[in-house]
Each structure stands twice: as C-alpha cells, then as structure tokens.
Amino acid sequence: MLIKSPIHDVHEKFAAKFTEFAGFKMPIYYSSIKNEHITVREKVGLFDVSHMSNIWISGSDAEKLISLTTIEDASKIKNEMSQYTAILREDGTIIDDVIFMHLNDEYMMIPNAGMSEKIADWLRKKAKENNLTVKINDVSRNYTILAIQGPDSRNTLQKLTDTDLNKIGFFGCSYIHIAGKECIISHTGYTGELGFELQINNKEKPEVLFNKIISEGGEYGIKPIGLGARDTLRLEKSFLLAGNEFKDGRTPLEALLNWAINWNHEFIGKTSLLKQKEMGNYERLTNLLCLENGVPRNGCEIQKDGLKVGIVTSGTISPCLNKGIAMAYVKSEYREIDNILDILVRGKKIKAKVTKPPFVKKDWAKLK
C-alpha cells in the first residue's frame, strides 16, 4: 500500500492529481506542470515534499559518524548550518545524496524518498563497526516537510514569523516559529530559486501551516506545486535526482560532484575515488540541449556517428526554454562544449548540443 503524506487531505481539497513515487502517493500537479513551473520561476510556490526522509543523529560521536560515512568533514559545518553531501559504498559509488543540518548537539539528515531505512541501517552498521557512540533515530513518518520556493518565498514566509529571515543565510538552518507552529527552517532548495524548507512535527498540525502559507501568499500569486514541476525545475538547473543520476552505481566524480568532496578527511569510498580520479577516463554527467523537436527521456541512448557514447539519465521539455533538455553520462572524449551528439528518441535521432550547466540561468524571470 502506498504511503500518503500526513497532509494528504489538504491536497485532495486543492484537487491534486496524484502519482506513485518511491512508494508514496504524492501530488504530481494541481493545474498543470507548466503553469506551476512558471509560477515558481516568476512568483512563489508551495510544495509538500514529505516523501523525503528525516533521521536524527546524536551522541558524542555523531560528528565522527557523519564524517566517516559522507564525503564531507562534519567538523567544518558550524551550528545552524546545513550541508549537501553524499553517502558512498566502499567502491566509491553513491548510495544516496543527502543534506544534513547541524542543530546544537544533534544532526538531522534528510535522505531521499524511500531511503530512510536503508540509510539508517547503514549508519548503525558503520557506527557499530567503528565502535562509535551514536543514536540513530528514523523519524521520517513523524514529520511533514514543506518547501516554499520562488522569488517571493521570503516575503510570503516573513508575514508569518517574527524571525528576520534575511538573517538565515544560504544553507543556514534553525528552530523557528511560523504562524505559531514550531519547526526547523533551512534555506536551501531544489528549484534554483530563492527558497526555504520547513520540517514540521506532525503534532504541530502541519495542514494548518500549509493553508496559512497559501493564504498569506495570495498577494504574491502563490500556488500549491506538485512533483511534476519539482522535477522540471530541478532539471533546468541541472540538479541531480538520486533515482535517475545514481541508479546504476555512479561515483561523485562521474556525477560532477567533485566540488562537494572534502578530500582532507578519511571517508568510506575515498580510496576508490582516488584511483578513479588518477585514471581519469570515466564517463561524466553532461548537459545536452536539443536542436530538433523531441523529448529525451531516461534510458535514451546517446550516439556519435552511429556509435553509442552515453545514456540519458533525465530528460524533459524545458518550460522556460521550450526545448528538449537532458542530462546524460557521456564518454569523456565527447563532452566538449558545443559538440553535437544524437539522442535516440523512439528510434529517431535528435541532434543535441553539449552545453554548460545550468540550462536556465539565474534570474530567468527578470531577464526574459
């Protein structure tokens, strides 16, 4: 049976259309994916992302465990700051990409949908193997996660709190009261726009908060947004989706996450990554902009002169560009910017150009 969001009834009242995603029944859209996409780029939208996971990590060795199991040195992340990172197997391949928040003497880790048990078990296993004193508490079903994204997201939330949201910097996090509800706020996002996430304990009646945000955001044109637009928004910004970009056991080097690796500490998978880095001849994630009509999708083959040189992991029609866009793993010798490759879409070759990420630049709404 599919897991429903704690505020599922709210989505039904907004006439949401639902989809199955990683074992959850979640809104895919309310009006249309394109309409909701443009709303977030130009105004502000409210997402329910409660399919994501919540794991508390505490104890005297919590910092050591996070540093051991991720590519980040947790000692570098100050209190009330969060960090994007990845959890690796010994062979250097990615189990999941996560964000963790440092909140006083504890850390809250946010794995992807359907990954809570797997990540919690992995953390417990590594803690036991290394004799670390930690407590791992999977509280995923105890929380509702809301994401408010778009140019007017701060203006909307500011109406509901006495906390100056301008003081919560990028990747900052803290405890806060929004509309009288205690929650954890973080300033990250998965759309490439200004945005915040709220982790709300279900005891706080998150459905009330959802409705108040919609009400107060009315003057800015706020709308509830489904997972369909969440996917197209993230793809325009070249953000990775774990179930696509890491599905076949990819490493951070292949996924262009070099920038997220703190090499100055020991972590699981480091030895394997150093070997791959030295070899250098591995496929890398590549942006492709379609020059002809066609919708690239996950699994489409990439060719050059009839030879297979890669595979699409994520693809769609960009609502902002009105062109097909794709991310694909491509052999290193074919990744030169402006190189023309073919994407096989339903047996038809679609010409596409290698481009620099992201597909849609910052402040697209203003520049257009």
Image: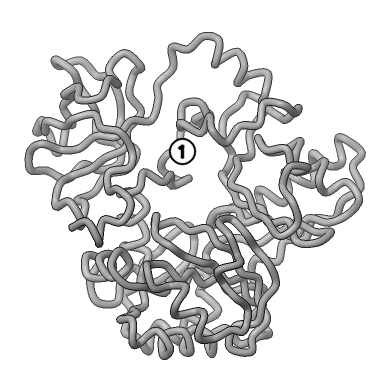
Q: Is residue 1 visible?
A: no
Q: Is residue 343 visible?
A: yes
Say above or below: 126 vs 150.
above
Q: Compare residues 87 and 359 and report the one nearer the observer.
A: 359
In the rendered image, residue 180, in percent from the top left (x then y), is placed at 64, 89
Mark 1, other Cα within 10 Å: few <14 / some 14–19 / many ≥20: some
Say above or below: 280 vs 285.
above
Number of marks in the rendered image: 1
**Who's the residue at 55% across and 15% down the image?**
276
In the rendered image, residue 62, in percent from the top left (x then y), is placed at 83, 49
Q: Which residue is mark 1?
A: 247
**Who's the residue at 68% across and 81% down the image?**
182
**Who's the residue at 34% across and 80% down the image?**
222
The amino acid marked with disc number 1 is: Lys
Q: Is residue 326 left or right of residue 125?
A: left
**Who's the residue at 78% across and 42% down the image?**
75
Q: Secondary structure at mark 1?
A: loop
Q: Compare residues 103 and 118 and report the one nearer the observer.
A: 103
Say above or below: 140 vs 294.
below
In the rendered image, residue 362, in percent from the top left (x then y), is placed at 33, 51
Q: Give the quadrant of residue 90.
A: top right
Q: Is residue 159 left or right of residue 108?
A: left
Say above or below: 201 vs 283.
below
Q: Give the quadrant of residue 181.
A: bottom right
Quadrant assignment for the C terminus: bottom left
